[in-house]
Amino acid sequence: MDQTLFANLCKAGKFKEALNLAIQGHEDEKFTPSRFAMDKKTGLPIFYRGNKRVEPDETGVWQLAKSLKDWG
């Protein structure tokens, strides 16, 4: 995903197009995100499928995000 283009689409208010850019090529996966929010601290998107947080793995396949509690 092109982060610059994603950010420009968000700034222009084209959120549906930005989400489509993020999931391009992975539309039919089980955990493809249905919405996103921007992290205020980092400015990076946080993707959600329903109320569950999802993120792409190393191969680009969308998976449930690992809990931050598991990292420490």
Image: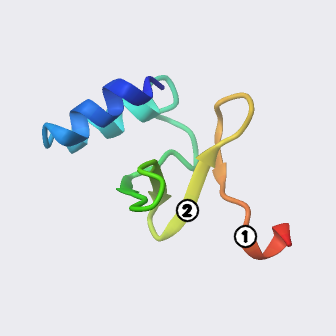
Identify the residue at horizontal 66%, vertical 58% (top origin): 65
Identify the residue at horizontal 43%, vertical 30% (top origin): 3
54 vs 50, left or right, is: right
Disc assigned to residue 34 = none
Percent of width and height locating residue 41: 45, 61
Percent of width and height locating residue 22: 43, 34
Percent of width and height locating residue 20: 33, 33
| Name of the residue lying farthest toward the front | 41
Q: Considering only order in the chain, which callout, 2 or 1, is on the residue closer to the N terminus?
A: 2
Residue receiving disc 1: 68
Q: Quadrant of residue 57?
A: top right
Q: Secondary structure at mark 2?
A: strand
| Name of the residue lying farthest toward the left | 12
35 vs 57, left or right, is: left
41 vs 18, left or right, is: right
Estimate how packed mark 1 is, as few (under 14), some (14 to 19) or many (20 or more) residues with alpha carbons within 10 Å. few
Q: Secondary structure at mark 1?
A: helix
Q: Amino acid under label 1?
A: Leu
Instruction: Say which quadrant the C terminus sits in.
Output: bottom right
Residue receiving disc 2: 53
